[in-house]
Image: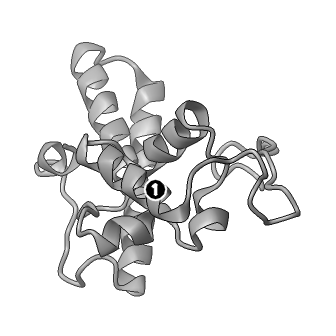
Amino acid sequence: MARMHSRKKGKSGSTKPLVKKKPTWLIYSPKEIESLVVKLAKTGKTTSEIGSELRDGYGIPDVKTLTKKKINEILKENKLESKLPEDLKNLIRREIAILKHREKNKQDQTSKRGLQLTEAKINRLVKYYKKKGVLEKTWKYTREKAELLAH
């Protein structure tokens, strides 16, 4: 997919295996995998961090093919989901970092543009999540409450 603001080609990503069946070498059952997801979520990890930890630390290649549920669905069942979606939270954290940088470096016009692009992405994502019902219709993003939202 093309990049949104830079008019360049996108980065290539990895593809999932075509065959969706349990590997023969895997020792975990679906219930054990779900309990691992819950355990990692209780330590404060995000969904992408949980997936990376399961892949790298436990040798679980794909949670969805093994448990028939996404990591988010498992967290929802156990009431461990966060109020904000992870991608929105990451964009808010990026905006906070750019704002802190701009306080120290007032002449940096490139970061000003980066701030504008990041804020546009946040607003677009908020609009999408309001339409899908993930966020309340009255939810409003402001820079003042950004610090509180990201943590």
Is 28 displayed left or right of 8 in the figure? left
Q: Is residue 100 in view from this perspective? A: yes
Is 150 displayed left or right of 118 in the figure? left
Which of these two is toward me, 114 or 136? 136
- Name the amino acid type tagged 1: Glu
Where is residue 18? Give x, y as percent.
88, 62
The residue drawn where x is 37% and y is 47% is 46
Where is residue 95? Give x, y as percent.
33, 39
The residue drawn where x is 42% and y is 28% is 111
Where is residue 143? Give x, y as percent.
19, 49
Residue of label 1:
32
The residue drawn where x is 40% and y is 49% is 36
**Quadrant where the N terminus is found in the figure:** bottom right
Q: Relative to residue 95, is residue 127 depicted above or below?
A: below
- In terms of secondary structure, where does tag 1 sit? helix
Q: Relative to residue 57, is residue 131 depicted above or below?
A: below
Where is residue 138? Give x, y as percent.
18, 81
Q: Relative to residue 60, is residue 17 depicted above or below?
A: below
Which of these two is toward me, 109 or 5? 5
| Applied colour scheme | one colour
